[in-house]
Image (spheres, helix red, strand yellow):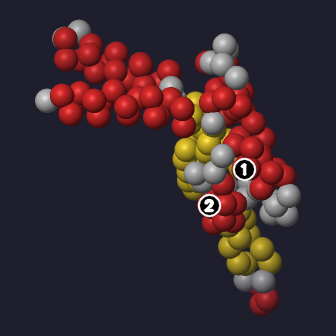
Amino acid sequence: MGRRKHNSAEARKEAKKTYYVAKLMNNPTSPRKTRLVADLIRGVDVDKALAILQYNPRESAPKMRKLLLSAIANWQAKNEGKRLEDSQLYVKTVMVDEGRTLRRMRTAPQGRGYRVRKRSNHITMVVGSRVEETAAVAPQTETEEQK
């Protein structure tokens, strides 16, 4: 493998160490309904997001709460020595993509059949730490000032 490919692979590997993600595939609710819940927690601290999801009456809120708990567990697995309270975790991104659509037929008047589309979605949630991001930004600004 060439040096350029090796360096880019090492950079991707280092970036994955600070990337804490959880995915839910084929969630049987429509993406539009799930995006309404995702917009509520995007960019919010983890504790506040858990509270929002716990008391939200929408169908996809308990599933997204469970997914957020999974992302937090992934963060804890990669950062065993750190405390959750000190890291200032927040919901970095929440993406709701369209999944598989099941097509069914429903009986209709005069011998016809209407098509029913049962939509599903894929949810990808990324959790980030505000402490790590400020530490990563600070050295870069110092080197730019020294130039």
Q: Amino acid at mark 2?
A: Asp
Residue 100, given in percent of the width and then of the height, sits at 62, 52
Residue displayed at 34% across by 21% down: 11
Residue 113, quarter of the rendered image: bottom right
Residue 125 visible in the picture: no
- Residue furthest out toward the left: 147
Give the left or right position of residue 103, taking residue 137 as reference.
Answer: right
Give x and y (percent) for residue 145: 21, 33
**Disc 1 vs disc 2: which is toward the camera?**
1
In which quarter of the view is residue 75 placed?
A: top right
In this view of the protein, which residue sits in the foreground, 20 or 144? 144
**108 or 83: which is nearer to us?**
83
Q: Which mark is residue 69?
A: none
- What amino acid is found at the position of numbered circle 1 in the picture? Ala
Pointer 1 residue: 49
Give the image location of residue 74, x and y in percent: 66, 26
Separation of residues labelled 1 and 2 (CA atoms): 11 Å
- Check residue 39 in the rendering and tell me which mark sits there, or answer none: 2
Mark 1 Cα within 10 Å, few/some/many (few <14, many 20+)? many
* Residue 134 visible, this angle: yes
Q: Is residue 6 left or right of residue 43?
A: left
